[in-house]
Amino acid sequence: MAEAKKIAIVYKTKEPEILRVIDMVKRIMKPESIEEHPLSSLVGRKLGGFDLIVCLGGDGTLVRTCRVVENGGIILPVNMGKKGYLMEVDPEKLPYYLEKYRKNEFLVEKCFKLKIDYGGRTLNAVNEVVIRNIIGLKQVTLSVELEEGSFIVEGDGVLVSTPIGSSAYSLNAGGPFVLSNVNILVCTPLCARRPLRPLIVNSNAIIKVKYLSGEEIQMIIDGEEALKVDPKETIEITGSMETVNIIRFSSSFNIKRMGRLTGGVENG
């Protein structure tokens, strides 16, 4: 049996449906302690020391939760949004899935984060890091360096994503859909002048991005955190040892997620 004596519930806004689901979790799980955390209260903080973190919301809420949960924390996402490509559990089926959790009938999807070194700081991303022009009217020229060599991107910029982030911005920019258990990074040029294709590298590869010319650039992390980039600084990106741990109840969830994204039928 999987016991969750200490539970955190993360949500965006405390709407009536959120309150109903929180009461449901309390009634079924009967934890010794339960803490409720609106996302706004977690800015600049870390969430740790919990047996289970229940995330109520859509994909954006899940990504924000993953950014603040300390390494090793296990997250159960519950879809309170409209689409929720990363969400497996709907609120009406939550009692069934909570019982499966208690019976230890679940899987843990381990997804590594990105480690970004820039300007003496180390940052983390769950989905992706984007280095691109600030205004978006003029192109930039960037150098992308790997151990094997380097290439030039002339365009809006470049994006590096994790496997779990491959179904977000990277996919819309022409990148591939990647299963979450594959240890690779996807490097996707953004609106490049020359027909560059996305590049797949090992998760332990170090990708160095340098500004060469053009418009001012910024670095955007998970679509949330934006930093203006000093053109003299190099940005280093690689896979992190820190992981996101998401509870899944189906081994075929990745394929179902791909079906949702393409508008296909969810089989399996």
Image: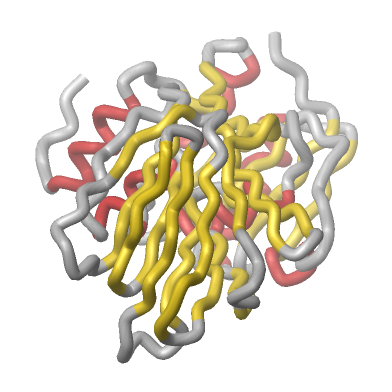
Quarter of the rendering containing residue 32: top right
Between residues 189 and 126, which one lies in front from this camera angle? 189
Between residues 161 and 6, which one lies in front from this camera angle? 161
| Residue 87 appears in the rendering | no
Question: Taking 141 as reference, is 42 above or below it?
Answer: above
Query: Residue 153: percent from the left, percent from the top?
Result: 32, 62
Render colour scheme: secondary structure
Question: Taking 166 as reference, is 239 above or below it?
Answer: above
Residue at horizontal 87 percent and vertical 36 percent from the top: 49
Question: Taking 109 as reference, is 207 above or below it?
Answer: below
Query: Residue 8: percent from the left, percent from the top?
Result: 76, 45
40 relative position to 226: left or right: right
Query: Residue 82: percent from the left, percent from the top?
Result: 34, 60
Query: Residue 118: percent from the left, percent from the top?
Result: 69, 60
227 relative position to 85: left or right: right
Determine the residue located farthest toward the left in the rendered image: 264
| Residue 25 appears in the rendering | yes
Q: Quadrant of the N terminus?
A: top right
Residue at horizontal 14 percent and vertical 58 percent from the top: 195
